[in-house]
């Protein structure tokens, strides 16, 4: 090694943010192993790399003793004082034992150490970048697929998407672009592993945050999301400004904002409903697109009984119970739906008020 090598380490420190002193110490530690391995030495040695010239020296470290039992590890007081009269028993004497051809081994070892440290530093930087992006949306390019994963290039790193995290309507080919949601970032021996998803409710939330400026600005808040990926979703929104309609803001002019999201999710239907502190009103809104006559709330059991017009019963329940299931997931309340005829037969009394019109039917298909 030479002064040019030290200068290269200095440049690395500026470019990669890797401390030059840390690199040199790592090289010295690796050279100790290299010396012992290549020269079959059991000596206790120290390797010194000159911080200016790059010159490498190897020193055997020996303890000063009265009677030498192991000449590889010990030196007599008499011999030590021939080197320096100030040595005393139990002092450590360093004797240079640098082999003639050690420069070649040193250069090779240094290159390996620096390469490894650069790789580790880059992995650390990538991990630091993406751990802050957990629960965020990313755009990547599909590289390949095997029996378990899609492999997606995110630029600096390759993410994996388990096939269980793709939507039923998703079919990706190599070089296709996709938007996905980061669900996990982990450190592994091969670097950071980033797991992404297309089915997570967080993807829908992030897509709305990208498309709706009022959400990004904090005027409109997403209170809850319920999703059956690739089929239907419900999202509850609230406006902190009474002059801003949260549902209208999410739908956008001529439905353009929500339609962009629907297109990204391959035709997934999205119901945007108005959030309310009042459980009865919130549950009624959540059952959109069906109309609701009355909601009876049992706060202790966190359960609601919902009365709907006879002709709205199948719509309120939905295909295979999907609408009611999503509404329950969205609100966090159990929902028991009955038609007006069923309520009458079971003797359930309720005020015959006009239908609640607060639910926003935004079937953006």
Image (spheres, rainbow, N blue to C red):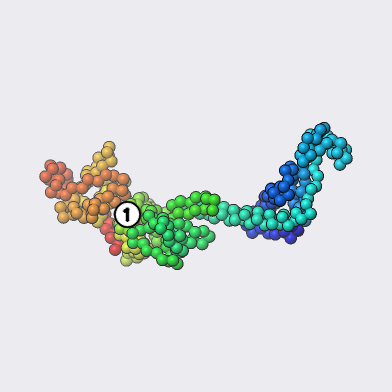
Q: Which residue is drawn at 13% across and 43% down?
A: 346
**Quadrant of the rendering where the C terminus is positioned:** bottom left
> How many labels, in total?
1
- Image quadrant holding the N terminus, namely bottom right
* Residue 272 visible, this orientation: no
Decide if residue 315 is on the left or right side of residue 63: left
Can you tell which quarter of the image residue 271 is in?
A: bottom left
Question: Could one spot residue 259 in this view of the protein?
Answer: yes
Position of residue 325 measured from the top left corner of the image (x, y, whole percent): 27, 50
Q: Residues within 10 Å of mark 1 (few under 14, many from 20)?
A: some
Q: Residue furthest left?
A: 345
Q: Residue at x 45, y 67 (%)?
A: 175
Name which residue lies at 41% across and 66% down. 173
Query: Mark 1 falls on what kind of element?
Result: strand
Viewer-closest of 170 and 312: 170
Q: In this orientation, which residue lies closer to the viewer: 256 or 233?
A: 233
Q: Using residue 135 as the reference point, say whether residue 2 is left or right of it.
A: right
Residue 54 percent location from the top left of the image: 75, 55
Residue highlighted by disc 1: 228
* Residue 92 image offset from top left, x and y in percent: 79, 38
Nearest to the observer: residue 329 or residue 222: 329
Residue at 78 percent across and 50 percent down: it is 98
Left or right side of 266 for 79: right
197 vs 328, nearest the viewer: 197
């Amino acid at each position: 090694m030479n002064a040019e090598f030290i200068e290269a380490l200095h440049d690395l420190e500026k470019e990669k943010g890797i401390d030059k002193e840390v690199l040199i110490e790592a090289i010295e530690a690796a050279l100790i192993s290299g010396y012992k391995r290549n020269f079959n030495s059991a000596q206790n040695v120290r390797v010194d790399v000159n911080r200016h010239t790059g010159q490498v020296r190897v020193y055997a470290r020996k303890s000063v003793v009265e009677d030498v039992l192991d000449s590889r590890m010990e030196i007599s007081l008499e011999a030590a004082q021939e080197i320096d009269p100030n040595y005393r028993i139990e002092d450590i004497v360093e004797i240079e034992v640098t082999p003639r051809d050690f420069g070649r081994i040193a250069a090779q070892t240094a290159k390996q150490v620096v390469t490894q440290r650069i790789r580790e530093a880059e992995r650390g930087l990538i991990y630091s970048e993406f751990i802050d992006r957990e629960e965020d949306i990313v755009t990547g390019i599909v590289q390949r697929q095997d029996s378990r994963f899609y492999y997606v290039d995110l630029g600096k790193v390759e993410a994996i998407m388990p096939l269980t995290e793709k939507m039923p309507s998703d079919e990706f080919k190599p070089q296709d672009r996709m938007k996905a949601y980061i669900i996990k970032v982990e450190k592994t021996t091969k670097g950071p592993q980033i797991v992404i998803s297309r089915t997570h409710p967080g993807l829908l939330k992030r897509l709305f945050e990208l498309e709706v400026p009022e959400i990004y600005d904090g005027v409109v808040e997403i209170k809850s999301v319920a999703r059956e990926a690739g089929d239907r979703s419900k999202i509850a929104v609230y406006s902190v400004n009474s002059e801003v309609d949260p549902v209208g803001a999410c739908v956008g002019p001529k439905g353009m904002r929500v339609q962009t999201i629907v297109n990204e999710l391959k035709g997934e239907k999205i119901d945007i409903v108005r959030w309310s502190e009042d459980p009865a009103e919130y549950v009624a809104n959540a059952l959109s697109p069906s109309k609701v006559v009355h909601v009876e709330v049992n706060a202790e059991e966190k359960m609601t009984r919902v009365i709907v017009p006879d002709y709205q019963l199948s719509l309120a329940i939905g295909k295979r119970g999907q609408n009611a299931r999503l509404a329950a997931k969205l609100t966090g309340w159990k929902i028991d739906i009955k038609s007006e005829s069923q309520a009458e037969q079971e003797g359930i009394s309720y005020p015959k008020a006009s239908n609640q019109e607060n639910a926003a039917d935004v079937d953006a298909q």
